Protein backbone atom coordinates (compact mmCIF):
# COMPACT_ATOMS: atom_id res chain seq x y z
CA UNK A 1 0.00 0.00 0.00
CA UNK A 2 1.25 3.49 -0.85
CA UNK A 3 1.65 5.56 2.28
CA UNK A 4 -0.84 8.44 2.08
CA UNK A 5 0.53 11.92 1.63
CA UNK A 6 -1.88 13.11 4.33
CA UNK A 7 -4.55 11.59 6.58
CA UNK A 8 -7.55 12.57 8.69
CA UNK A 9 -5.45 12.76 11.86
CA UNK A 10 -3.06 15.30 10.31
CA UNK A 11 -6.07 17.46 9.37
CA UNK A 12 -7.49 17.19 12.90
CA UNK A 13 -4.13 18.18 14.43
CA UNK A 14 -4.01 21.30 12.24
CA UNK A 15 -7.47 22.29 13.43
CA UNK A 16 -6.52 21.79 17.06
CA UNK A 17 -3.31 23.81 16.62
CA UNK A 18 -5.36 26.69 15.22
CA UNK A 19 -7.76 26.49 18.17
CA UNK A 20 -4.95 26.66 20.69
CA UNK A 21 -3.23 29.51 18.87
CA UNK A 22 -6.35 31.66 18.84
CA UNK A 23 -7.67 30.39 22.20
CA UNK A 24 -11.09 30.25 20.62
CA UNK A 25 -12.87 28.45 17.82
CA UNK A 26 -11.42 29.13 14.41
CA UNK A 27 -13.30 31.71 12.38
CA UNK A 28 -13.96 31.26 8.68
CA UNK A 29 -11.09 31.69 6.22
CA UNK A 30 -11.23 34.43 3.54
CA UNK A 31 -12.38 31.78 1.05
CA UNK A 32 -15.09 30.60 3.45
CA UNK A 33 -16.17 34.18 4.09
CA UNK A 34 -16.43 34.65 0.33
CA UNK A 35 -18.66 31.61 0.05
CA UNK A 36 -20.77 32.71 3.03
CA UNK A 37 -21.22 36.15 1.47
CA UNK A 38 -22.16 34.55 -1.85
CA UNK A 39 -24.76 32.38 -0.11
CA UNK A 40 -26.07 35.42 1.73
CA UNK A 41 -26.36 37.42 -1.50
CA UNK A 42 -28.11 34.52 -3.22
CA UNK A 43 -30.58 34.20 -0.34
CA UNK A 44 -31.25 37.94 -0.32
CA UNK A 45 -31.73 37.95 -4.10
CA UNK A 46 -34.14 35.02 -3.84
CA UNK A 47 -36.07 36.85 -1.12
CA UNK A 48 -36.19 40.01 -3.24
CA UNK A 49 -37.36 38.01 -6.24
CA UNK A 50 -40.13 36.42 -4.19
CA UNK A 51 -41.19 39.80 -2.83
CA UNK A 52 -41.13 41.30 -6.34
CA UNK A 53 -43.24 38.43 -7.67
CA UNK A 54 -45.75 39.02 -4.86
CA UNK A 55 -45.96 42.75 -5.62
CA UNK A 56 -46.27 42.06 -9.35
CA UNK A 57 -49.11 39.64 -8.72
CA UNK A 58 -50.89 42.18 -6.53
CA UNK A 59 -50.33 44.89 -9.16
CA UNK A 60 -51.63 42.59 -11.87
CA UNK A 61 -54.80 41.94 -9.87
CA UNK A 62 -55.23 45.67 -9.23
CA UNK A 63 -54.84 46.46 -12.95
CA UNK A 64 -57.28 43.72 -13.95
CA UNK A 65 -59.86 44.90 -11.42
CA UNK A 66 -59.44 48.50 -12.59
CA UNK A 67 -59.83 47.45 -16.23
CA UNK A 68 -62.89 45.40 -15.40
CA UNK A 69 -64.46 48.31 -13.57
CA UNK A 70 -63.59 50.74 -16.37
CA UNK A 71 -65.00 48.36 -18.96
CA UNK A 72 -68.18 47.96 -16.97
CA UNK A 73 -68.60 51.72 -16.59
CA UNK A 74 -67.92 52.23 -20.29
CA UNK A 75 -70.48 49.60 -21.16
CA UNK A 76 -73.07 51.30 -18.98
CA UNK A 77 -72.28 54.70 -20.46
CA UNK A 78 -72.46 53.45 -24.06
CA UNK A 79 -75.63 51.59 -23.36
CA UNK A 80 -77.33 54.85 -22.37
CA UNK A 81 -80.02 52.98 -20.58
CA UNK A 82 -80.87 50.92 -23.66
CA UNK A 83 -81.73 47.29 -23.27
CA UNK A 84 -81.75 44.31 -25.55
CA UNK A 85 -79.16 42.89 -27.88
CA UNK A 86 -77.13 46.09 -28.06
CA UNK A 87 -76.49 46.00 -24.29
CA UNK A 88 -75.57 42.31 -24.44
CA UNK A 89 -73.06 42.98 -27.22
CA UNK A 90 -71.47 45.74 -25.20
CA UNK A 91 -71.10 43.41 -22.23
CA UNK A 92 -69.54 40.81 -24.48
CA UNK A 93 -67.13 43.39 -25.85
CA UNK A 94 -66.22 44.52 -22.36
CA UNK A 95 -65.65 40.89 -21.29
CA UNK A 96 -63.47 40.32 -24.35
CA UNK A 97 -61.43 43.42 -23.51
CA UNK A 98 -60.93 42.20 -19.95
CA UNK A 99 -59.96 38.71 -21.14
CA UNK A 100 -57.43 40.15 -23.59
CA UNK A 101 -55.94 42.33 -20.85
CA UNK A 102 -55.72 39.36 -18.48
CA UNK A 103 -53.99 37.24 -21.13
CA UNK A 104 -51.46 39.98 -21.83
CA UNK A 105 -50.71 40.48 -18.13
CA UNK A 106 -50.42 36.73 -17.55
CA UNK A 107 -48.00 36.37 -20.46
CA UNK A 108 -45.87 39.21 -19.13
CA UNK A 109 -45.84 37.64 -15.65
CA UNK A 110 -44.87 34.18 -17.00
CA UNK A 111 -42.03 35.67 -19.06
CA UNK A 112 -40.63 37.39 -15.97
CA UNK A 113 -40.83 34.17 -13.91
CA UNK A 114 -39.04 32.32 -16.72
CA UNK A 115 -36.28 34.95 -16.82
CA UNK A 116 -35.75 34.66 -13.06
CA UNK A 117 -35.53 30.87 -13.28
CA UNK A 118 -32.98 31.15 -16.09
CA UNK A 119 -30.88 33.61 -14.06
CA UNK A 120 -30.97 31.30 -11.03
CA UNK A 121 -29.95 28.30 -13.16
CA UNK A 122 -27.11 30.30 -14.71
CA UNK A 123 -25.81 31.29 -11.26
CA UNK A 124 -25.87 27.67 -10.13
CA UNK A 125 -24.00 26.55 -13.26
CA UNK A 126 -21.37 29.25 -12.72
CA UNK A 127 -20.92 28.13 -9.09
CA UNK A 128 -20.48 24.50 -10.18
CA UNK A 129 -18.06 25.53 -12.94
CA UNK A 130 -15.99 27.52 -10.46
CA UNK A 131 -15.78 24.52 -8.12
CA UNK A 132 -15.14 21.96 -10.86
CA UNK A 133 -12.20 23.85 -12.35
CA UNK A 134 -10.45 24.22 -9.01
CA UNK A 135 -7.11 22.49 -8.44
CA UNK A 136 -6.48 20.85 -5.07
CA UNK A 137 -3.89 18.52 -3.56
CA UNK A 138 -4.75 14.83 -3.77
CA UNK A 139 -4.44 13.57 -0.16
CA UNK A 140 -3.18 10.17 -1.36
CA UNK A 141 -0.12 11.17 -3.38
CA UNK A 142 0.27 14.93 -2.89
CA UNK A 143 -0.19 15.68 -6.59
CA UNK A 144 -2.50 18.33 -8.04
CA UNK A 145 -5.98 17.03 -8.70
CA UNK A 146 -8.85 18.71 -10.53
CA UNK A 147 -11.88 19.09 -8.27
CA UNK A 148 -14.73 17.63 -10.32
CA UNK A 149 -18.39 17.91 -9.31
CA UNK A 150 -20.11 14.97 -7.67
CA UNK A 151 -21.58 12.41 -10.08
CA UNK A 152 -25.37 12.51 -10.41
CA UNK A 153 -25.64 9.18 -8.59
CA UNK A 154 -24.18 10.75 -5.44
CA UNK A 155 -27.37 12.77 -4.99
CA UNK A 156 -27.44 12.00 -1.25
CA UNK A 157 -24.39 14.23 -0.66
CA UNK A 158 -25.59 17.22 -2.71
CA UNK A 159 -27.42 18.78 0.26
CA UNK A 160 -24.12 19.32 2.11
CA UNK A 161 -22.40 21.21 -0.72
CA UNK A 162 -23.86 24.58 0.27
CA UNK A 163 -22.09 24.41 3.64
CA UNK A 164 -19.02 26.57 3.07
CA UNK A 165 -16.79 24.83 5.62
CA UNK A 166 -17.70 21.29 4.51
CA UNK A 167 -18.33 21.19 0.74
CA UNK A 168 -14.67 21.06 -0.28
CA UNK A 169 -13.95 18.19 2.15
CA UNK A 170 -16.73 16.15 0.52
CA UNK A 171 -15.57 16.90 -3.02
CA UNK A 172 -11.92 16.17 -2.20
CA UNK A 173 -12.81 12.86 -0.56
CA UNK A 174 -15.08 11.70 -3.37
CA UNK A 175 -12.71 12.77 -6.15
CA UNK A 176 -9.72 11.10 -4.48
CA UNK A 177 -11.59 7.88 -3.71
CA UNK A 178 -12.76 7.63 -7.31
CA UNK A 179 -9.20 8.23 -8.48
CA UNK A 180 -7.69 5.66 -6.05
CA UNK A 181 -10.34 2.92 -5.60
CA UNK A 182 -7.75 0.51 -4.14
CA UNK A 183 -6.85 2.85 -1.26
CA UNK A 184 -8.82 2.83 2.04
CA UNK A 185 -12.20 4.54 1.65
CA UNK A 186 -12.61 4.98 5.41
CA UNK A 187 -13.83 8.41 6.50
CA UNK A 188 -13.79 10.49 9.69
CA UNK A 189 -16.79 12.81 10.16
CA UNK A 190 -15.94 15.55 12.64
CA UNK A 191 -19.07 16.78 14.45
CA UNK A 192 -19.78 19.22 17.27
CA UNK A 193 -20.85 16.96 20.11
CA UNK A 194 -19.58 13.50 19.22
CA UNK A 195 -23.00 12.47 17.94
CA UNK A 196 -25.65 13.60 15.47
CA UNK A 197 -23.67 13.09 12.24
CA UNK A 198 -24.29 9.41 11.39
CA UNK A 199 -26.63 10.61 8.63
CA UNK A 200 -23.60 12.08 6.84
CA UNK A 201 -21.95 8.67 7.00
CA UNK A 202 -25.11 7.01 5.66
CA UNK A 203 -25.22 9.43 2.74
CA UNK A 204 -21.61 8.64 1.89
CA UNK A 205 -22.40 4.92 2.04
CA UNK A 206 -25.42 5.29 -0.27
CA UNK A 207 -23.40 7.41 -2.68
CA UNK A 208 -20.52 4.91 -2.66
CA UNK A 209 -22.94 2.11 -3.55
CA UNK A 210 -24.79 4.15 -6.19
CA UNK A 211 -21.51 4.96 -7.95
CA UNK A 212 -20.13 1.42 -7.70
CA UNK A 213 -17.36 2.24 -5.19
CA UNK A 214 -18.63 -0.47 -2.83
CA UNK A 215 -20.40 -3.75 -3.56
CA UNK A 216 -23.24 -3.76 -1.04
CA UNK A 217 -25.89 -1.29 0.14
CA UNK A 218 -25.76 -2.71 3.67
CA UNK A 219 -25.15 -0.12 6.39
CA UNK A 220 -24.56 -0.90 10.08
CA UNK A 221 -24.69 1.88 12.68
CA UNK A 222 -23.36 1.35 16.18
CA UNK A 223 -22.34 3.45 19.17
CA UNK A 224 -18.73 3.11 20.33
CA UNK A 225 -19.63 1.67 23.74
CA UNK A 226 -21.85 -0.97 22.13
CA UNK A 227 -19.09 -1.93 19.68
CA UNK A 228 -16.74 -2.49 22.61
CA UNK A 229 -19.06 -5.22 23.93
CA UNK A 230 -19.72 -7.28 20.79
CA UNK A 231 -17.73 -9.89 18.94
CA UNK A 232 -16.76 -9.28 15.32
CA UNK A 233 -18.89 -12.22 14.19
CA UNK A 234 -21.79 -9.77 14.46
CA UNK A 235 -20.32 -7.90 11.45
CA UNK A 236 -20.07 -10.92 9.13
CA UNK A 237 -23.21 -9.94 7.22
CA UNK A 238 -21.77 -6.50 6.42
CA UNK A 239 -19.43 -7.75 3.68
CA UNK A 240 -19.01 -5.11 0.96
CA UNK A 241 -21.00 -2.45 2.85
CA UNK A 242 -20.32 0.26 5.47
CA UNK A 243 -19.94 0.38 9.25
CA UNK A 244 -20.65 3.73 10.96
CA UNK A 245 -19.32 4.15 14.51
CA UNK A 246 -20.89 6.95 16.55
CA UNK A 247 -18.83 8.85 19.14
CA UNK A 248 -15.81 6.89 17.92
CA UNK A 249 -13.39 8.48 20.37
CA UNK A 250 -14.79 6.07 22.98
CA UNK A 251 -13.96 2.88 21.07
CA UNK A 252 -11.54 0.60 22.87
CA UNK A 253 -8.24 0.87 20.91
CA UNK A 254 -7.83 -2.90 20.57
CA UNK A 255 -11.40 -3.20 19.29
CA UNK A 256 -10.92 -0.67 16.49
CA UNK A 257 -7.68 -2.36 15.44
CA UNK A 258 -9.70 -5.59 15.18
CA UNK A 259 -12.38 -3.81 13.14
CA UNK A 260 -9.84 -2.33 10.71
CA UNK A 261 -8.31 -5.75 10.13
CA UNK A 262 -11.76 -7.29 9.76
CA UNK A 263 -12.77 -4.64 7.19
CA UNK A 264 -9.75 -5.24 4.93
CA UNK A 265 -10.47 -6.10 1.25
CA UNK A 266 -9.18 -9.66 1.70
CA UNK A 267 -11.45 -10.14 4.74
CA UNK A 268 -14.97 -8.63 4.82
CA UNK A 269 -14.20 -5.63 2.60
CA UNK A 270 -16.36 -2.95 4.25
CA UNK A 271 -15.82 0.78 4.75
CA UNK A 272 -15.43 2.15 8.29
CA UNK A 273 -16.76 5.63 9.10
CA UNK A 274 -15.93 7.27 12.42
CA UNK A 275 -18.09 10.11 13.72
CA UNK A 276 -17.12 12.10 16.77
CA UNK A 277 -15.92 15.29 18.43
CA UNK A 278 -12.53 16.85 17.71
CA UNK A 279 -10.82 16.44 21.10
CA UNK A 280 -11.81 12.81 21.60
CA UNK A 281 -10.87 11.82 18.04
CA UNK A 282 -7.54 13.65 18.22
CA UNK A 283 -6.69 11.87 21.44
CA UNK A 284 -7.82 8.55 20.02
CA UNK A 285 -5.60 8.81 16.93
CA UNK A 286 -2.69 10.04 19.03
CA UNK A 287 -2.88 6.86 21.12
CA UNK A 288 -3.45 4.55 18.12
CA UNK A 289 -0.86 5.44 15.51
CA UNK A 290 -1.07 2.01 13.85
CA UNK A 291 -4.51 2.74 12.41
CA UNK A 292 -3.87 6.40 11.43
CA UNK A 293 -3.07 5.62 7.80
CA UNK A 294 -6.31 3.68 7.44
CA UNK A 295 -8.25 6.97 7.62
CA UNK A 296 -7.26 9.41 4.89
CA UNK A 297 -10.37 11.55 4.57
CA UNK A 298 -11.80 14.04 7.06
CA UNK A 299 -15.24 15.64 6.66
CA UNK A 300 -15.27 18.66 8.97
CA UNK A 301 -18.82 19.60 9.86
CA UNK A 302 -18.26 20.67 13.46
CA UNK A 303 -18.54 24.40 12.62
CA UNK A 304 -22.05 24.10 11.19
CA UNK A 305 -24.55 26.72 12.34
CA UNK A 306 -28.18 27.61 11.61
CA UNK A 307 -27.44 28.76 8.05
CA UNK A 308 -25.77 25.44 7.23
CA UNK A 309 -28.63 23.43 8.75
CA UNK A 310 -31.18 25.36 6.68
CA UNK A 311 -29.03 24.73 3.58
CA UNK A 312 -29.27 21.02 4.35
CA UNK A 313 -33.05 21.35 4.61
CA UNK A 314 -33.25 23.08 1.22
CA UNK A 315 -31.13 20.36 -0.34
CA UNK A 316 -33.08 17.57 1.37
CA UNK A 317 -36.42 18.91 0.16
CA UNK A 318 -34.98 19.00 -3.36
CA UNK A 319 -33.65 15.44 -2.97
CA UNK A 320 -37.12 14.26 -1.86
CA UNK A 321 -38.82 16.31 -4.61
CA UNK A 322 -40.90 18.59 -2.40
CA UNK A 323 -41.06 22.40 -2.30
CA UNK A 324 -41.23 24.86 0.58
CA UNK A 325 -41.62 28.62 0.89
CA UNK A 326 -39.86 31.15 3.10
CA UNK A 327 -42.39 30.74 5.94
CA UNK A 328 -41.57 27.02 6.20
CA UNK A 329 -37.85 27.70 6.55
CA UNK A 330 -38.59 30.26 9.28
CA UNK A 331 -40.48 27.53 11.15
CA UNK A 332 -37.51 25.20 10.71
CA UNK A 333 -35.21 27.85 12.21
CA UNK A 334 -37.45 27.89 15.29
CA UNK A 335 -37.36 24.08 15.44
CA UNK A 336 -33.55 24.17 15.50
CA UNK A 337 -33.69 26.01 18.83
CA UNK A 338 -35.09 22.87 20.48
CA UNK A 339 -32.18 20.58 19.52
CA UNK A 340 -28.41 20.44 19.95
CA UNK A 341 -26.44 22.63 17.55
CA UNK A 342 -25.19 20.56 14.64
CA UNK A 343 -27.38 17.51 15.36
CA UNK A 344 -27.96 16.63 11.71
CA UNK A 345 -29.46 13.22 12.55
CA UNK A 346 -32.23 14.72 14.67
CA UNK A 347 -32.87 17.48 12.13
CA UNK A 348 -33.17 15.01 9.22
CA UNK A 349 -35.57 12.94 11.35
CA UNK A 350 -37.72 16.07 11.77
CA UNK A 351 -37.60 16.74 8.01
CA UNK A 352 -38.55 13.14 7.23
CA UNK A 353 -41.65 13.45 9.42
CA UNK A 354 -42.68 16.67 7.68
CA UNK A 355 -42.11 15.22 4.20
CA UNK A 356 -44.06 12.04 5.06
CA UNK A 357 -47.08 14.11 6.11
CA UNK A 358 -46.80 16.24 2.97
CA UNK A 359 -46.78 13.20 0.70
CA UNK A 360 -49.47 11.41 2.71
CA UNK A 361 -51.95 14.12 1.75
CA UNK A 362 -50.82 13.82 -1.88
CA UNK A 363 -48.95 17.12 -1.95
CA UNK A 364 -45.56 18.16 -3.27
CA UNK A 365 -45.27 21.40 -1.28
CA UNK A 366 -44.70 21.48 2.48
CA UNK A 367 -47.38 23.38 4.41
CA UNK A 368 -47.58 24.58 8.01
CA UNK A 369 -50.01 21.74 8.81
CA UNK A 370 -47.24 19.21 8.06
CA UNK A 371 -45.44 20.34 11.23
CA UNK A 372 -48.29 19.08 13.43
Image (cartoon, grey):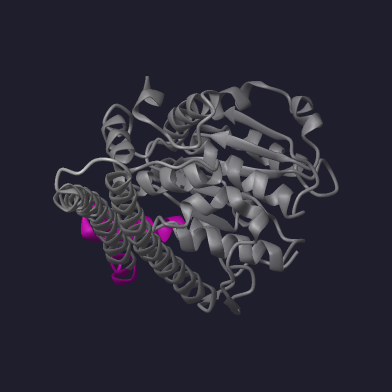
Q: Is residue 310 magenta?
A: no
Residue 212 shown left or right of residue 57 in the figure: right
Residue 267 shown left or right of residue 281 in the figure: right
**Residue 211 x, y percent position in the rendering:** 73, 55
Residue 270 shown left or right of residue 303 in the figure: right
**Which quadrant of the view contains residue 251?**
top right
The magenta stretch is: 12-34
Residue in view at x 69 percent, y 51 percent: 208
**Residue 45 x, y percent position in the rendering:** 27, 62
Residue in view at x 60 percent, y 40 percent: 202
Residue in view at x 29 percent, y 71 percent: 30
> Height in image: 104 above or below 223?
below
Could you say which is closer to the camera, residue 89 or residue 25? 89
Could you say which is closer to the camera, residue 48 or residue 232? 48
Residue in view at x 33 percent, y 29 percent: 339
Q: Is residue 29 magenta?
A: yes
Residue 127 shown left or right of residue 362 in the figure: left
Number of numbered discs overlaid on the protein picture: 0
Image quadrant in which the C terminus is located: top left
Dominant SS type (magenta): helix
> Height in image: 301 above or below 2?
above
Image quadrant in which the N terminus is located: bottom right
**Residue 195 x, y percent position in the rendering:** 45, 33
**Which quadrant of the view contains residue 271?**
top right
Amino acid sequence: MIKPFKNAYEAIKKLLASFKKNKKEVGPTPEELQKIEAEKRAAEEAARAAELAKHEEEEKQRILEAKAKAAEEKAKKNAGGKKGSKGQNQKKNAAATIAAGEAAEQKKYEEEVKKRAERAAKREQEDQKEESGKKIVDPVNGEDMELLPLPDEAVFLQKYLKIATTSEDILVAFNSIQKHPDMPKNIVVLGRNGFGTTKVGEDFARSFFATGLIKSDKIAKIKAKQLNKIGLEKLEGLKGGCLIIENAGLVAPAKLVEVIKNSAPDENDYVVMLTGEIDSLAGFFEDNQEIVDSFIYLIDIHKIRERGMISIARGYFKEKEVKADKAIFERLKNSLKTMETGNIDRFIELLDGIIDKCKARGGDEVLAEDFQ
